[in-house]
């Protein structure tokens, strides 16, 4: 009896550690990407990393216990990375400092959180599910990967805001990392495949240090051993009416992400897609609360990650308790800045390469969704028009919209949002029955 108890404890501990590694690997890269976009110094990136770990742990625990109540990681949202990148460039062109832009982004996350919370409280979340057909969700995932690929590729090539030149050495390390992660995820077996991203980051980090003669950061010397995450590290949030429409549209799009994650994980846990409207509404409410927490701790807003389902399929772990323990462990982990600062030393080209590798599967998922239904003339026209306009906007410089009213600038300068809204509107207005003859 005692042996069975110790075996269960050991299995539970190993499951918790494995969940913890997954949470860590999924959260570690995006703060570095944001740091390179906004040209944050090493200490600022370390602080952002600490706050990200804290928020990811808290958000995942709250959703698992009070929200949709499934073992789904709440991680930095790709959509928000896109919004951060677009507003960084448009803010710089408008003469705003990066900190001023980050304060506006905090306000935008609060707007989005308010809408998500209201959708859930007033039980409106499930009422918009009919909008997110496979065509819409597939187009959104495709546009998301297209827009973010530019950001990731710039980071891999060592291109900074101040210089547009490609750094050959950094690019070489990045592409070796990319090849390793993709290779392990396709041909690796067991733990090699499960932790392909983490192994790729570790290998790329060592290769980077060897390539650049072991250069390391020495800013960690003054870090205290224990500290709590800083509150409003970027300053007070700046809520503007100009970002209100952006907050609303982002909230609606994030609902589709929430539902997709619930369906994927419930299918893994129960063997079939299984969810209730109450789960969706509670998940929406706590997604809104988590947006508010993220804004208060100056990080990138989280969203339920469908990749949690893939992790569970690879490892066979379906229990919720180890997931909750791992979430709390990540919160505790965030209280020790020297350890967080060490992880923050991951080079930006390596982090960007690892992220780009994970988005290969996301691109495939988008294409799979779009082609799950026959691509007739109606669907091809909707996709073609939306992609041409949405992707076309991604190539326009942010200053092209300087003459546009402020309330529209942040919308029109984001090709992802414009393209997704176009697909939704056209899919609703152009009914399939109109194409039949």
Image: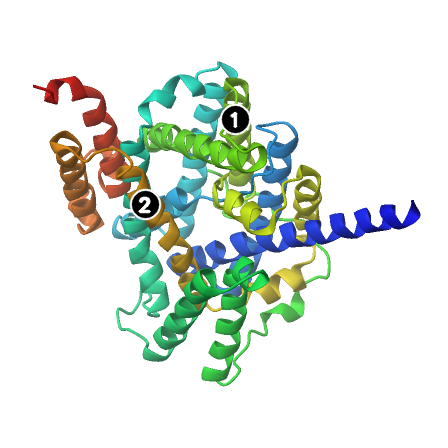
Quadrant for residue 325, please give it: top right
Name the quarter where the C terminus is drawn: top left
Its colouring scheme is: rainbow
- Can residue 346 be seen here? The reply is no
Q: Earlier in the sequence, mark 2 or mark 1?
A: 2
Label of residue 144 in the image = 2
Q: Residue furthest bottom?
A: 213
Q: Look at 43% across and 34% down and name the residue there.
A: 260
In this view, the residue in front, 264 or 144, is: 264
Q: CA distance from mark 2 to mark 1?
A: 27 Å
Q: Which mark is residue 274?
A: 1
Q: Nearer the viewer, mark 2 or mark 1?
A: 1
Label 2: element kind: helix
Q: Position of residue 378 (x, y in %)?
A: 14, 29
Quadrant position of the N terminus in the picture: top right
Residue in front for this viewpoint, 362 or 92: 362
Left or right: where 49 falls relative to 176: right
Q: Residues within 10 Å of mark 2 (few under 14, many from 20)?
A: many
Visible residue check, residue 236: yes
Bin the neighbour count of mark 1 within 10 Å (Cα to Cα): few under 14, some 14-19, many 20 and up.
some
Looking at the image, which residue is at 32% across and 49% down? 145
- Mark 1: which secondary structure? loop
């Amino acid at each position: 009896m005692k042996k069975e108890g110790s075996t269960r404890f050991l299995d539970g501990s190993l499951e918790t550690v494995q969940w913890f590694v997954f949470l860590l690997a999924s959260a570690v890269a995006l703060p570095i990407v944001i740091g390179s976009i906004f040209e944050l110094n090493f200490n600022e990136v370390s602080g952002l990393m600490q706050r990200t770990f804290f928020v990811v742990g808290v958000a995942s625990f709250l959703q698992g216990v009070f929200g949709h109540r499934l073992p789904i990681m709440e991680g930095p949202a790709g959509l928000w990375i896109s919004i951060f990148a677009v507003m960084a460039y448009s803010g710089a062109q408008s003469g705003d400092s990066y900190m001023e832009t980050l304060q506006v982004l905090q306000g935008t996350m609060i707007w989005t959180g308010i809408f998500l919370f209201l959708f859930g409280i007033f039980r409106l979340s499930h009422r918009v599910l009919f909008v997110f057909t496979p065509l819409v969700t597939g187009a959104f995932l495709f546009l998301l990967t297209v827009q973010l690929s530019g950001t990731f590729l710039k980071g891999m090539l060592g291109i900074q805001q101040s210089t547009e030149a490609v750094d050959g050495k950094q690019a070489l390390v990045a592409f070796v990392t990319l090849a390793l992660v993709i290779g392990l995820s396709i041909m690796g077996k067991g733990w090699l495949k499960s932790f392909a991203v983490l192994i790729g980051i570790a290998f790329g980090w060592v290769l980077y240090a060897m390539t650049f003669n072991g250069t390391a950061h020495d800013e960690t010397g003054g870090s205290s051993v224990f500290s709590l995450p800083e509150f409003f590290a970027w300053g007070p949030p700046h809520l503007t009416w100009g970002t209100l429409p952006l907050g609303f549209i982002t909230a609606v799009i994030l609902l589709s992400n929430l539902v997709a994650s619930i369906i994927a994980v419930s299918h893994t846990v129960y063997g079939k897609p299984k969810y209730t409207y109450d789960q969706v509404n509670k998940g929406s409410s706590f997604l809104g609360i988590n947006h508010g927490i993220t804004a208060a701790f100056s990080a990138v807003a989280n969203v339920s990650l469908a990749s949690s389902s893939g992790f569970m399929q690879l490892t066979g772990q379906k229990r919720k308790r180890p997931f909750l323990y791992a979430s709390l462990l990540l919160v505790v982990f965030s209280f020790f800045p020297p350890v967080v600062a060490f992880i923050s030393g991951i080079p930006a080209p390596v982090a960007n390469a690892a992220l780009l590798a994970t988005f290969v599967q996301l691109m495939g998922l988008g294409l799979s969704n779009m082609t799950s239904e026959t691509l007739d003339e109606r669907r091809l026209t909707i996709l073609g028009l939306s992609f041409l306009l949405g992707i076309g906007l991604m190539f326009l410089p942010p200053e092209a919209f300087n003459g546009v009213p402020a309330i529209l600038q942040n919308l029109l300068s984001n090709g992802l949002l414009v393209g997704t809204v176009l697909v939704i509107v056209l899919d609703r207005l152009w009914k399939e029955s109109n194409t039949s003859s």
